[in-house]
Amino acid sequence: MEEIQNTKTIKAALLGVGTVGSGVYELVRERQDDFINICGVRIEIAKILVRDTSKSREGIPSSLLTDKWEEIIRDDEISVIIEVMGGIEPARTYILEAMRAGKQVITANKDLIAEHGHELLSTAEEMQCDLKFEAAVAGCIPIIQVLKHSMASEDITEIMGIVNGTTNYILTRMTQSGLSYEEALQEATDLGYAEADPAADVDGLDAGRKIAIMASIAFHSRVTFSDVYIEGIRKITAKDIYYAKEFGSVIKLLGIAKKTEDGIEVKVLPILIPKDHPLATVNDSYNAVFVHGTASGDTMYYGRGAGKLPTASAVTGDLCTVVRHLTERHNNLHVCSCYRDIPVKNIKDTCSRFFLRLQVEDRPGVLANISSVFGTSQVSIAQVVQKSRENGVAELVIITDEVKELYFSDAMSILEQLSIIKNISSLIRVYE
């Protein structure tokens, strides 16, 4: 007991104490003895930056709260900054100022890393301090550690993952219970998986930021959020789910990054994947990341992608690493690894297979006309299914062979002008 009481203390400050921040505080407090044994020092949350210090936070002493950044940045006893406030500003400014003041930084801010990762990592390298961000991607799944260190010598050629729990929950409920998109979204909202404004999740923006971060690390070349081609799940219907099952597939929102001979492909899309693919069985709010390397082959990393304690676990894992570096006087293992300059390809220059659901006139020659348009545009049809006809309108489902997106886009532009096409109900990529 005397040995624990005499243990050195390293002080940290939390920027933000919302869902994740309160989880971090809870884990640090509850696992204090474990941290002493693991890290060799006591970890203390000395200050917490909040907007309103008068607001009561359950389980957190009001004496720790401050609304003045200066109290933290000027406190020489605080050596670690944990940013869980989110958003670009003032988080970016605070992190840059903290590193320039010689403090170590941990962040869970995917928006910030996806947009300004190069600037932040360059500053960390310049100041010889740590910048850790495991919690910015896929919650408690240690994918950043894997890509940065465990697979450092690997030639990674593809990353594909379910990295948004909200959309995965919605698609799971649509698949397993036959709910409509609207019904599944409402259920996700009621359970707290979806925000009141779900746009960042259902429009693919959250997943886009995460795949940009992973692509940058895996391919050692800068990929930003603006480089990512994104489509969300708002247009996915129960009928799409039904047809996916007919083709032995499920629909998942996937983040995909590929390194090719002529550049990097990076996109977020709803995609039909075979039901026997490992990612097809990742359901509810779980995340999984599938990595392919030339030497290692396929590996997959699975777990909770969000939530108070899973994300806090990733933050405190980074905290243990930072504290070890401080006590061993060794840090800066997370410098920017983007030593290559590989171009990011425009989506039109990439190739995909397509699932296309059409409402067309129910009369002879319609399929021949559609096939002619596709043939002229160098699009090859792999499968055609007709399941229903009503009031002179037939529903066609077409799956194409792999084709350049530009050619398929040209074909669709022509189809949209044909009087025989009553409606283009769905357009979804198919796993290659």
Image (cartoon, helix red, strand yellow):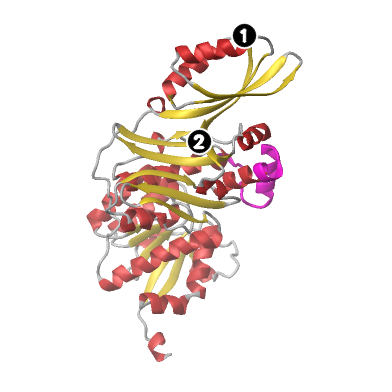
Mark 1–mark 2 distance (CA, rounded to whole Å): 33 Å
Q: Nearer the viewer, mark 1 or mark 2?
A: 1
What span is colored magenta in the figure? 174-199
Q: Amino acid at mark 2?
A: Leu
Q: Residue at x 43, y 24 (%)?
A: 403
Mark 2: which secondary structure?
A: strand
Q: Is residue 191 magenta?
A: yes
Secondary structure under the numbered disc 1 in the rendered image? loop
Residue holding disc 1: 365
Name the spot of residue 402 as percent of width and height, x first: 45, 27
Label 1: few (<14), some or many (≥20) within 10 Å?
few
Nearer to me, 108 or 38: 38
Lower position in the chain sequence, tag 1 or tag 2: 2
- x then y, percent, for residue 168: 58, 46
Name the spot of residue 22 as percent of width and height, x first: 53, 63
Q: Which mark is residue 269?
A: 2
